[in-house]
Image (cartoon, rainbow, N blue to C red):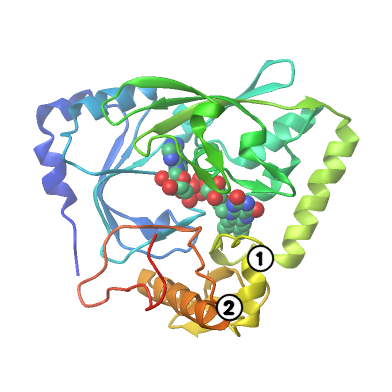
Amino acid sequence: MKQVNGERLLASLGEGVKDIRGRLTPDAPMDKVTWFQAGGLAELMFQPHDVDDLVTFLKLLPEDVPLTVVGVGSNLLVRDGGIAGVVLRLSAKGFGQVELVGENRIKAGAICPDKHVAAMAMDNGIGGFAFYYGIPGSIGGALRMNAGANGTETKDRVVEVHAVDRKGNVHVLSNADMGYSYRHSSAPSDLIFTHAVFEGYPDDRAKIRAEMDAVRQHRETVQPVKEKTGGSTFKNPEGHSAWKVIDEAGCRGLMNGGAQMSALHCNFMINIGHASGYDLEYLGEMVRQRVFEDHGIKLEWEIKRLGVFMPGREVRPFQGVTTE
Ligand SMILES: Cc1cc2nc3c(=O)[nH]c(=O)nc-3n(C[C@H](O)[C@H](O)[C@H](O)COP(=O)(O)OP(=O)(O)OC[C@H]3O[C@@H](n4cnc5c(N)ncnc54)[C@H](O)[C@@H]3O)c2cc1C
Protein backbone atom coordinates (compact mmCIF):
# COMPACT_ATOMS: atom_id res chain seq x y z
CA MET A 1 0.00 0.00 0.00
CA LYS A 2 1.38 3.40 -0.96
CA GLN A 3 1.58 5.78 1.99
CA VAL A 4 3.22 8.83 0.45
CA ASN A 5 2.75 11.04 -2.59
CA GLY A 6 6.02 12.52 -3.68
CA GLU A 7 4.80 13.91 -7.01
CA ARG A 8 2.27 16.05 -5.19
CA LEU A 9 4.89 17.33 -2.73
CA LEU A 10 7.31 18.09 -5.57
CA ALA A 11 4.62 20.00 -7.52
CA SER A 12 3.74 22.00 -4.38
CA LEU A 13 7.28 23.44 -4.28
CA GLY A 14 6.46 25.45 -7.41
CA GLU A 15 8.72 27.11 -9.95
CA GLY A 16 11.61 27.53 -7.48
CA VAL A 17 12.71 23.93 -8.03
CA LYS A 18 14.07 24.99 -11.43
CA ASP A 19 16.99 26.62 -9.57
CA ILE A 20 17.85 23.37 -7.81
CA ARG A 21 20.92 21.61 -9.23
CA GLY A 22 20.72 18.46 -7.13
CA ARG A 23 18.48 15.44 -7.66
CA LEU A 24 14.84 15.30 -6.54
CA THR A 25 13.26 11.84 -6.51
CA PRO A 26 9.60 11.42 -5.58
CA ASP A 27 8.61 8.17 -3.79
CA ALA A 28 12.20 7.00 -3.37
CA PRO A 29 12.55 3.45 -1.99
CA MET A 30 14.40 3.53 1.35
CA ASP A 31 15.24 -0.18 1.13
CA LYS A 32 17.81 0.91 -1.48
CA VAL A 33 19.39 3.23 1.11
CA THR A 34 19.40 1.26 4.36
CA TRP A 35 21.83 -1.52 5.20
CA PHE A 36 18.83 -3.55 6.36
CA GLN A 37 17.42 -3.31 2.81
CA ALA A 38 13.99 -2.86 4.34
CA GLY A 39 11.44 -0.09 4.80
CA GLY A 40 8.98 2.03 2.81
CA LEU A 41 9.28 5.05 0.54
CA ALA A 42 10.66 8.51 1.16
CA GLU A 43 7.98 10.93 -0.02
CA LEU A 44 10.62 13.08 -1.73
CA MET A 45 14.36 12.44 -1.68
CA PHE A 46 16.69 15.38 -2.24
CA GLN A 47 20.39 14.97 -3.01
CA PRO A 48 21.88 18.49 -3.02
CA HIS A 49 24.70 19.26 -5.40
CA ASP A 50 26.62 21.32 -2.82
CA VAL A 51 26.06 23.52 0.25
CA ASP A 52 24.67 26.44 -1.79
CA ASP A 53 22.19 24.14 -3.47
CA LEU A 54 21.18 22.77 -0.06
CA VAL A 55 20.61 26.29 1.29
CA THR A 56 18.56 27.27 -1.80
CA PHE A 57 16.36 24.20 -1.32
CA LEU A 58 15.86 24.78 2.41
CA LYS A 59 14.76 28.36 1.80
CA LEU A 60 12.26 27.05 -0.76
CA LEU A 61 10.86 24.28 1.45
CA PRO A 62 7.78 25.31 3.49
CA GLU A 63 8.47 25.07 7.23
CA ASP A 64 5.67 22.58 7.82
CA VAL A 65 7.18 19.95 5.50
CA PRO A 66 9.11 17.43 7.62
CA LEU A 67 12.79 17.02 6.76
CA THR A 68 14.84 13.94 7.65
CA VAL A 69 18.56 13.71 6.98
CA VAL A 70 20.17 10.32 6.41
CA GLY A 71 23.75 9.22 5.87
CA VAL A 72 24.50 5.85 4.28
CA GLY A 73 21.81 4.10 6.32
CA SER A 74 24.00 1.79 8.42
CA ASN A 75 22.13 2.67 11.61
CA LEU A 76 18.58 3.08 10.32
CA LEU A 77 15.37 1.10 10.56
CA VAL A 78 12.75 2.59 8.25
CA ARG A 79 9.13 1.69 8.89
CA ASP A 80 7.03 0.21 6.08
CA GLY A 81 4.65 3.17 5.77
CA GLY A 82 7.58 5.30 4.61
CA ILE A 83 8.88 8.72 5.58
CA ALA A 84 6.66 11.76 5.10
CA GLY A 85 8.18 14.93 3.66
CA VAL A 86 11.73 15.26 2.40
CA VAL A 87 14.56 12.82 3.01
CA LEU A 88 17.89 14.55 2.53
CA ARG A 89 20.79 12.48 1.32
CA LEU A 90 24.02 14.36 0.69
CA SER A 91 25.69 13.74 -2.68
CA ALA A 92 29.18 12.24 -2.77
CA LYS A 93 30.21 14.89 -5.28
CA GLY A 94 29.37 17.82 -3.03
CA PHE A 95 29.95 16.34 0.41
CA GLY A 96 32.27 13.35 -0.02
CA GLN A 97 35.75 14.90 -0.01
CA VAL A 98 38.49 14.30 2.51
CA GLU A 99 41.66 16.45 2.72
CA LEU A 100 44.52 17.46 5.00
CA VAL A 101 44.07 20.95 6.40
CA GLY A 102 47.06 21.37 8.70
CA GLU A 103 49.33 19.39 10.91
CA ASN A 104 47.43 16.29 12.05
CA ARG A 105 44.16 17.85 10.91
CA ILE A 106 41.72 16.33 8.43
CA LYS A 107 38.64 17.93 6.90
CA ALA A 108 35.94 15.53 5.73
CA GLY A 109 32.59 16.02 4.01
CA ALA A 110 29.57 14.61 5.82
CA ILE A 111 28.90 11.80 3.33
CA CYS A 112 32.57 10.77 3.26
CA PRO A 113 32.85 7.17 4.55
CA ASP A 114 34.53 6.93 7.98
CA LYS A 115 36.92 4.44 6.38
CA HIS A 116 38.30 7.07 4.00
CA VAL A 117 39.19 9.29 6.94
CA ALA A 118 41.02 6.37 8.57
CA ALA A 119 42.90 5.71 5.32
CA MET A 120 43.84 9.38 4.84
CA ALA A 121 45.13 9.52 8.43
CA MET A 122 47.19 6.38 7.92
CA ASP A 123 48.69 7.64 4.64
CA ASN A 124 49.84 10.80 6.42
CA GLY A 125 51.07 9.25 9.67
CA ILE A 126 48.23 10.67 11.78
CA GLY A 127 47.22 8.48 14.70
CA GLY A 128 43.84 8.22 16.44
CA PHE A 129 41.59 7.31 13.49
CA ALA A 130 42.02 3.53 13.13
CA PHE A 131 38.67 2.99 14.91
CA TYR A 132 36.89 4.55 11.94
CA TYR A 133 38.21 1.75 9.74
CA GLY A 134 35.67 -0.64 11.23
CA ILE A 135 32.60 1.62 11.20
CA PRO A 136 30.67 1.39 7.92
CA GLY A 137 28.88 4.75 8.20
CA SER A 138 29.51 8.27 6.91
CA ILE A 139 31.02 11.21 8.78
CA GLY A 140 27.58 12.86 9.12
CA GLY A 141 26.25 9.74 10.85
CA ALA A 142 29.37 9.56 13.01
CA LEU A 143 28.95 13.20 14.08
CA ARG A 144 25.31 12.69 15.02
CA MET A 145 25.76 9.27 16.68
CA ASN A 146 29.15 9.97 18.31
CA ALA A 147 30.22 6.76 16.57
CA GLY A 148 32.99 4.94 18.33
CA ALA A 149 34.85 1.66 18.67
CA ASN A 150 37.99 0.20 20.20
CA GLY A 151 38.04 2.77 23.00
CA THR A 152 37.83 5.88 20.78
CA GLU A 153 34.77 7.96 19.92
CA THR A 154 34.11 10.69 17.37
CA LYS A 155 34.11 13.24 20.20
CA ASP A 156 37.80 12.47 20.84
CA ARG A 157 38.78 13.70 17.36
CA VAL A 158 36.31 16.50 16.44
CA VAL A 159 37.60 20.08 16.33
CA GLU A 160 34.72 21.85 14.58
CA VAL A 161 31.57 20.92 12.73
CA HIS A 162 29.92 22.90 9.93
CA ALA A 163 26.17 22.66 9.63
CA VAL A 164 23.08 24.18 8.04
CA ASP A 165 19.81 24.52 9.96
CA ARG A 166 16.27 23.91 8.68
CA LYS A 167 15.97 27.54 7.56
CA GLY A 168 19.22 27.43 5.57
CA ASN A 169 21.42 29.34 8.05
CA VAL A 170 25.03 28.18 8.30
CA HIS A 171 26.55 27.33 11.72
CA VAL A 172 29.99 26.34 12.98
CA LEU A 173 30.01 24.25 16.16
CA SER A 174 32.90 23.53 18.49
CA ASN A 175 33.45 20.11 20.02
CA ALA A 176 31.73 21.35 23.21
CA ASP A 177 28.75 22.65 21.18
CA MET A 178 28.15 19.10 19.92
CA GLY A 179 27.19 18.03 23.47
CA TYR A 180 28.55 14.53 23.15
CA SER A 181 27.73 11.55 25.33
CA TYR A 182 27.61 7.82 24.62
CA ARG A 183 26.27 7.39 21.03
CA HIS A 184 24.55 10.76 21.26
CA SER A 185 24.98 14.42 20.39
CA SER A 186 22.71 17.06 21.92
CA ALA A 187 23.38 19.49 19.05
CA PRO A 188 20.00 20.81 17.77
CA SER A 189 18.19 18.02 15.96
CA ASP A 190 17.42 20.16 12.89
CA LEU A 191 21.11 20.62 12.04
CA ILE A 192 22.40 19.10 8.83
CA PHE A 193 26.13 18.53 9.20
CA THR A 194 27.97 19.35 5.99
CA HIS A 195 31.60 18.79 6.95
CA ALA A 196 33.92 18.68 9.94
CA VAL A 197 37.55 19.12 10.93
CA PHE A 198 39.23 16.42 13.01
CA GLU A 199 42.57 16.27 14.77
CA GLY A 200 44.84 13.33 15.53
CA TYR A 201 48.47 13.04 16.59
CA PRO A 202 51.71 12.02 14.88
CA ASP A 203 52.13 8.27 14.72
CA ASP A 204 54.02 5.59 12.83
CA ARG A 205 52.36 4.52 9.58
CA ALA A 206 53.19 0.82 9.96
CA LYS A 207 51.72 0.87 13.47
CA ILE A 208 48.53 2.53 12.24
CA ARG A 209 48.29 0.00 9.37
CA ALA A 210 48.60 -2.86 11.86
CA GLU A 211 45.88 -1.32 14.05
CA MET A 212 43.56 -1.01 11.06
CA ASP A 213 44.19 -4.61 10.02
CA ALA A 214 43.45 -5.74 13.57
CA VAL A 215 40.20 -3.74 13.58
CA ARG A 216 39.10 -5.37 10.29
CA GLN A 217 40.06 -8.88 11.31
CA HIS A 218 38.33 -8.59 14.67
CA ARG A 219 35.13 -7.31 13.04
CA GLU A 220 35.04 -10.10 10.51
CA THR A 221 35.35 -12.65 13.31
CA VAL A 222 32.79 -11.32 15.79
CA GLN A 223 30.24 -9.32 13.76
CA PRO A 224 27.91 -10.33 10.91
CA VAL A 225 29.48 -7.64 8.70
CA LYS A 226 28.43 -9.32 5.43
CA GLU A 227 24.75 -9.49 6.46
CA LYS A 228 21.98 -6.94 5.99
CA THR A 229 22.21 -5.33 9.42
CA GLY A 230 22.06 -2.01 11.27
CA GLY A 231 24.98 -2.54 13.64
CA SER A 232 24.34 -2.57 17.39
CA THR A 233 20.59 -2.64 17.93
CA PHE A 234 20.64 -1.42 21.54
CA LYS A 235 22.97 0.81 23.54
CA ASN A 236 24.94 -0.86 26.31
CA PRO A 237 22.95 -0.34 29.51
CA GLU A 238 24.87 1.28 32.38
CA GLY A 239 27.24 -1.36 33.82
CA HIS A 240 26.24 -4.09 31.32
CA SER A 241 26.92 -5.26 27.77
CA ALA A 242 23.77 -5.30 25.66
CA TRP A 243 24.80 -8.52 23.88
CA LYS A 244 25.34 -10.30 27.22
CA VAL A 245 21.90 -9.51 28.66
CA ILE A 246 20.30 -10.37 25.30
CA ASP A 247 22.15 -13.69 25.29
CA GLU A 248 21.23 -14.45 28.91
CA ALA A 249 17.57 -13.70 28.11
CA GLY A 250 17.72 -16.45 25.46
CA CYS A 251 17.43 -14.15 22.47
CA ARG A 252 20.51 -15.20 20.48
CA GLY A 253 19.15 -16.38 17.11
CA LEU A 254 15.58 -15.30 18.01
CA MET A 255 13.49 -14.78 14.86
CA ASN A 256 10.42 -12.86 13.77
CA GLY A 257 9.41 -13.20 10.11
CA GLY A 258 12.50 -12.41 8.07
CA ALA A 259 14.34 -10.80 10.99
CA GLN A 260 16.74 -12.48 13.38
CA MET A 261 19.04 -11.60 16.29
CA SER A 262 22.36 -12.70 14.83
CA ALA A 263 23.74 -15.96 16.21
CA LEU A 264 27.24 -14.50 15.73
CA HIS A 265 26.66 -11.24 17.63
CA CYS A 266 23.29 -11.20 19.34
CA ASN A 267 23.04 -7.39 19.63
CA PHE A 268 23.01 -7.24 15.81
CA MET A 269 19.65 -7.71 14.09
CA ILE A 270 19.83 -9.13 10.59
CA ASN A 271 17.48 -9.32 7.66
CA ILE A 272 17.74 -12.97 6.69
CA GLY A 273 15.69 -12.65 3.52
CA HIS A 274 12.70 -10.45 3.10
CA ALA A 275 12.29 -8.81 6.47
CA SER A 276 9.96 -5.84 6.62
CA GLY A 277 10.49 -2.86 8.89
CA TYR A 278 7.69 -4.40 10.97
CA ASP A 279 9.51 -7.74 11.34
CA LEU A 280 12.68 -5.99 12.51
CA GLU A 281 11.08 -3.55 14.95
CA TYR A 282 8.74 -6.18 16.42
CA LEU A 283 11.74 -8.46 17.00
CA GLY A 284 13.56 -5.62 18.74
CA GLU A 285 10.60 -5.05 21.06
CA MET A 286 10.40 -8.81 21.78
CA VAL A 287 14.03 -8.66 22.88
CA ARG A 288 13.41 -5.58 25.07
CA GLN A 289 10.51 -7.38 26.74
CA ARG A 290 12.51 -10.55 27.42
CA VAL A 291 15.53 -8.66 28.75
CA PHE A 292 13.24 -6.59 30.95
CA GLU A 293 11.58 -9.72 32.36
CA ASP A 294 14.91 -11.47 32.81
CA HIS A 295 17.10 -8.66 34.15
CA GLY A 296 14.76 -5.74 34.90
CA ILE A 297 16.82 -3.75 32.38
CA LYS A 298 15.16 -1.41 29.90
CA LEU A 299 17.23 -1.63 26.74
CA GLU A 300 17.37 1.58 24.75
CA TRP A 301 17.40 1.47 20.95
CA GLU A 302 20.69 2.59 19.41
CA ILE A 303 19.35 2.12 15.89
CA LYS A 304 17.33 5.11 14.70
CA ARG A 305 13.77 4.19 13.74
CA LEU A 306 12.25 6.49 11.14
CA GLY A 307 8.91 6.92 9.41
CA VAL A 308 5.40 5.68 9.98
CA PHE A 309 3.87 2.24 10.39
CA MET A 310 1.66 0.56 7.82
CA PRO A 311 -1.92 0.77 9.14
CA GLY A 312 -2.65 -2.41 11.10
CA ARG A 313 1.07 -3.22 11.41
CA GLU A 314 1.99 -0.89 14.26
CA VAL A 315 4.64 -2.00 16.73
CA ARG A 316 3.98 -0.87 20.27
CA PRO A 317 6.70 -0.91 22.91
CA PHE A 318 6.02 -3.94 25.09
CA GLN A 319 4.39 -3.52 28.47
CA GLY A 320 6.83 -2.64 31.22
CA VAL A 321 9.24 -1.05 28.77
CA THR A 322 9.03 2.69 28.49
CA THR A 323 9.50 4.49 25.19
CA GLU A 324 12.39 6.93 24.72
C1 LIG B 1 28.20 -3.88 10.45
C2 LIG B 1 28.04 -2.62 11.26
C3 LIG B 1 28.95 -2.32 12.26
C4 LIG B 1 28.82 -1.14 13.00
N1 LIG B 1 29.74 -0.86 13.98
C5 LIG B 1 29.65 0.29 14.68
C6 LIG B 1 30.61 0.61 15.70
O1 LIG B 1 31.55 -0.11 15.96
N2 LIG B 1 30.47 1.78 16.36
C7 LIG B 1 29.44 2.65 16.10
O2 LIG B 1 29.37 3.70 16.75
N3 LIG B 1 28.51 2.36 15.17
C8 LIG B 1 28.59 1.22 14.45
N4 LIG B 1 27.65 0.92 13.50
C9 LIG B 1 26.51 1.83 13.29
C10 LIG B 1 26.71 2.91 12.23
O3 LIG B 1 27.68 2.53 11.27
C11 LIG B 1 27.10 4.25 12.86
O4 LIG B 1 26.11 4.72 13.76
C12 LIG B 1 27.31 5.32 11.80
O5 LIG B 1 27.90 6.46 12.40
C13 LIG B 1 26.02 5.74 11.09
O6 LIG B 1 26.40 6.49 9.95
P1 LIG B 1 25.44 6.51 8.66
O7 LIG B 1 26.06 7.39 7.65
O8 LIG B 1 25.12 5.13 8.23
O9 LIG B 1 24.15 7.22 9.29
P2 LIG B 1 22.62 6.79 9.14
O10 LIG B 1 22.45 5.40 9.65
O11 LIG B 1 22.15 7.06 7.76
O12 LIG B 1 21.94 7.82 10.15
C14 LIG B 1 22.20 7.71 11.53
C15 LIG B 1 21.80 9.02 12.21
O13 LIG B 1 22.70 10.04 11.79
C16 LIG B 1 21.96 11.16 11.29
N5 LIG B 1 22.75 11.77 10.21
C17 LIG B 1 23.37 11.15 9.18
N6 LIG B 1 24.01 12.05 8.41
C18 LIG B 1 23.77 13.27 8.96
C19 LIG B 1 24.14 14.61 8.62
N7 LIG B 1 24.88 14.87 7.53
N8 LIG B 1 23.71 15.60 9.42
C20 LIG B 1 22.95 15.36 10.50
N9 LIG B 1 22.57 14.12 10.88
C21 LIG B 1 22.97 13.08 10.11
C22 LIG B 1 20.64 10.58 10.79
O14 LIG B 1 19.62 11.55 10.80
C23 LIG B 1 20.39 9.49 11.84
O15 LIG B 1 19.82 10.07 12.99
C24 LIG B 1 27.75 -0.26 12.74
C25 LIG B 1 26.84 -0.56 11.71
C26 LIG B 1 26.97 -1.72 10.98
C27 LIG B 1 25.98 -2.01 9.89
Left or right relative to 206: residue 163: left
Amino acid type of disc 1? His
Q: Which mark is residue 200?
A: none
The label number, if any, that marks residue 240 in the structure image: 1
> At 74% across and 49% down in the image, what residue appears?
150
Using the image, determine if residue 232 lies above or below residue 208: below
Type of residue at label 2?
Answer: His
Q: Quadrant of residue 118?
A: top right
In the rendered image, which residue does mark 2 sit on? 295
Whichever of callouts 2 and 1 sits on the residue coming sooner in the sequence is: 1
Quadrant location of the C terminus in the rendered image: bottom left
Q: Of helix, strand and loop, which one carries label 1?
A: loop
Look at the image and tell me whether residue 72 can be seen: no
The residue carrying mark 2 has its beta carbon less than 8 Å from ligand 1: no
| Residue located farthest toward the top when viewing the structure as drawn | 102
Residue name at image x 63 percent, y 74 percent: 245
